[in-house]
Image (cartoon, rainbow, N blue to C red):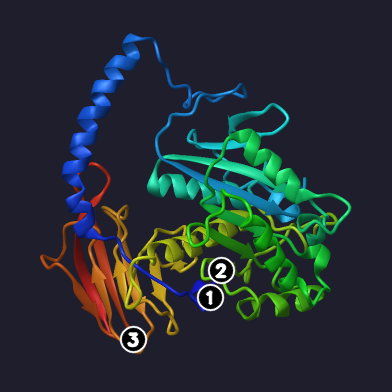
Amino acid sequence: MYNFTKIKYRKFSQWNHKRLKCNIMKIKTLSAITFFFTIISFAIGTHDHAGDFSDKEVKINSKKEFVIIAEGQSNMTATDPNIVPFDIKPNKNVFIWNNSKSNWEILKPNYDNIYFHFARKYQETYGGVVKIILNALGGKPIEEWIKKGSVDRHQMLVDQIQASGITKVNVHLWHQGESNSQDPNYIFKLNARLDLLESLPQYEKDKYFFLFGEIVHDYPVYKIWRAAALCYENVISRKYVAYVRSEGLNTVKSGPGINVHFDGVDLYKFGQRYFDVYQNMSLGQNLQVGGSFEIQNQNSDLWDLTKDTFILPSNSPLNTLVLPRNFYNKKFKITNLKETPVTLLPYSGNISGKSSYLLKKKSTIEFKGYSNGDGTAEAYQIINISE
């Protein structure tokens, strides 16, 4: 089982329920304003095409935008024909920039890939519109992204950003290294990539996140790259940079991509891992110590799928868990392997009539969530506790 808590997180936080309550009046006011302008827009013939599943240019609603830049080699492009597709259902609010046509299109991948699953998970969790610019190509060394190769891929990114009209980047996903697997200085070059990115006005320090993923974990050929990557904090002194492990993920079963290219279900999981790391970092901005983490459903690698159990490892820095919002009318368990107790909070409602519950060390608790009718759990009933 993958343990993303091995990554050294600097900050953690929780869903701020007080902040959500304080925003209720704002939401109501905004809803009234939105209704007013909607009536006006229909009167003058305005129409939003963001929901049209077509390859033609689409008009994107100006609601909240989240911008992703995806760079790297073949595991970022994910075009190996030996990949077995797992879950490539499009999301009508996830768009990719088509540089050849100079327009935004709904992302409809042929194969699972890291940026698609990250983007879809983000949109399903937080809403809004997600825009992706892809600047990746298989078999290319990092030198091409730091102005030291035969091709200037940094300038390619700059051109796409300018053409697309992007003014702010929220997260940069990086998966590259197979072509630099024997380079002990890789992290210094990755740091140079960050320097170039932050020379652009769309990359504001401390206001975006840079996540880079591990190339195939179990392939001995990559041990030099992996040793360098694991020491990234000694070189990259940026708190908004994090490493995403690939431990436990498998590659394609046939073709030249064996031991190199992740398979469909594994790219799906990898995208979820990237999202898990991003969420922990982003939710941690406003709380330095003793933060919390909203449990996701089975998409998280901390779930034991065979037992519907969320397992908190013994080395986890988390002290507070928010129960999953979408686990209604279902049973699930939480196992605390830590040597200290963990506070459990309801996403909404209560836990067996109480506002919180203290889960003792080395113990397991079983819940059932109850829905309020709109798909959100309104209460959690404790079924069993074992110590």
Query: Residues at badges 2 and 3 in contact (C-beta under 8 Å)?
Result: no
Which of the two discs, 2 and 3, labels the residue nearer the N terminus? 2
Q: Nearest to the eye among marks 2 and 3: give it.
A: 2
* Residue that carries the numbered disc 2 in the rendered image: 242
Query: Residues at badges 1 and 2 in contact (C-beta under 8 Å)?
Result: yes
Q: Please state if 319 lies on the left or on the right of 48 as rendered.
A: left
Per the rendering, the mark at residue 362 is 3
Query: In this orientation, which residue lies closer to the viewer: 86 or 132?
Result: 132
* Residue 123 at x, y percent in the picture: 45, 44
Per the rendering, the mark at residue 7 is 1
Q: Nearest to the eye among marks 1 and 2: give it.
A: 2
| Three-letter code, disc 3 | Lys
- The answer to whether residue 109 shows anywhere in this view is no
Mark 2 residue element: strand
* Residue 202 at x, y percent in the picture: 56, 48
Above-or-below relation of 243 to 258: below
Q: Which residue is rendered at x = 23% and y = 73% of the image? A: 384
Query: In this orientation, which residue lies closer to the viewer: 269 or 222?
Result: 222
| Three-letter code, disc 2 | Ala
Which quadrant, please, contains the N terminus? bottom right
Q: From mark 2 to mark 3, how far is it between C-alphas?
A: 29 Å
Local crowd size for mark 2, using a 10 Å CA cut-off: few (<14), some (14–19), many (≥20): many
Mark 1 residue element: loop
Which of the two discs, 1 and 2, labels the residue nearer the N terminus? 1
Above-or-below relation of 263 to 306: above
Q: Nearest to the eye among marks 1 and 3: give it.
A: 1
